[in-house]
Image (spheres, rainbow, N blue to C red):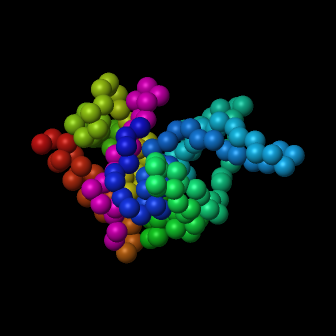
């Protein structure tokens, strides 16, 4: 997992942190006492990778409020509506599968540059497993990595073309 970029906005930091995680603790109440379980964690629509397991169930969690503990003196509550990305990302979400297919089949060299050149990761066979307005998710042999865009895509409508332009910028930066 890559370290999320530095930001003072707790909601942005929380999103970046969540997108870089593969495991989390889910706490509920059991007879009035807290009960926490280790869960595999993915940010929607990246959950498709787990869909084929017969002994696995997917649950969608709607965040009402989060508690960010980001170090000494950095403990804050995040309202669920603030945790979500504020612009309409439905066009990007609808095109995500095709973007991932295109990048993995036609631009595996760029993905390798992202992993090695920008994230300092080793290994071969890196694949892009997710894209959202703030960056991309990569995976190689069970290892995951998060690569944030230099700045979130903030066009009024988050189009696939805007995402592809951000991917080209990353590729250019990785090759330098």
**Quarter of the image where one finds residue 48:** top right
Whole-percent x, y for residue 154 in the image: 34, 69
Q: Is residue 162 left or right of residue 133?
A: left
Q: Is residue 62 visible?
A: yes
Which residue appears farthest toward the right when viewing the image? Answer: 31
Q: Which of 105 and 151 is in front in this view?
A: 151
Which residue appears farthest toward the left when viewing the image? Answer: 176
Q: Is residue 32 left or right of residue 108?
A: right
Please give the name of the residue rendered at 35% of the width and 32% of the height, measured from the top-left corner.
126
Q: Which of 78 and 39 is in front in this view?
A: 78
Of the 4 image quadrants, the one containing the C terminus is top left
Whole-percent x, y for residue 169 in the image: 21, 53
Q: In this view, does 23 lie to the left or right of 122?
A: right
Q: Give the range drawn in magenta.
A: 138-155
Which residue appears farthest toward the bottom when viewing the image? Answer: 156
Classify 69 as above or below 10.
Answer: above
Q: Which of 83 and 108 is in front in this view?
A: 83
Q: Is residue 10 magenta?
A: no
Q: Is residue 151 magenta?
A: yes
Whole-percent x, y for residue 76 in the image: 53, 60
Q: Can residue 164 be seen in this view?
A: no
Please give the name of the residue rendered at 70% of the width and 46% of the height, measured from the top-left corner.
27
Whole-percent x, y for residue 93 in the image: 47, 58
Classify 40 as above or below 166.
Answer: above
Please give the name of the residue rendered at 34% of the width and 38% of the height, measured from the top-left corner.
105
Please give the name of the residue rendered at 59% of the width and 58% of the height, measured from the top-left corner.
66
**Quarter of the image where one finds residue 81:** bottom right
Of the 4 image quadrants, the one containing the N terminus is top left
């Amino acid at each position: 997992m890559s370290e999320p970029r530095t930001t003072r906005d707790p909601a942005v930091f929380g999103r970046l942190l969540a997108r870089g995680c593969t495991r989390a603790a889910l706490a509920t109440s059991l007879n009035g006492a807290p009960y926490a379980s280790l869960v595999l964690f993915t940010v929607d629509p990246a959950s498709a990778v787990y869909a084929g397991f017969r002994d696995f169930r997917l649950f969608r969690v709607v965040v009402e409020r989060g508690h960010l503990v980001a170090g000494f003196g950095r403990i804050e509550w995040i309202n669920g509506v603030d945790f979500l990305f504020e612009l309409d990302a439905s066009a990007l979400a609808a095109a995500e599968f095709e973007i991932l297919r295109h990048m993995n089949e036609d631009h595996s060299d760029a993905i390798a540059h992202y992993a090695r050149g920008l994230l300092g990761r080793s290994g071969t066979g890196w694949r892009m497993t997710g894209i959202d307005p703030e960056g991309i998710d990569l995976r190689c042999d069970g290892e995951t990595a998060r690569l944030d865009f230099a700045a979130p895509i903030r066009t009024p409508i988050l189009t696939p073309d805007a995402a592809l332009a951000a991917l080209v910028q990353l590729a250019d930066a990785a090759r330098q």
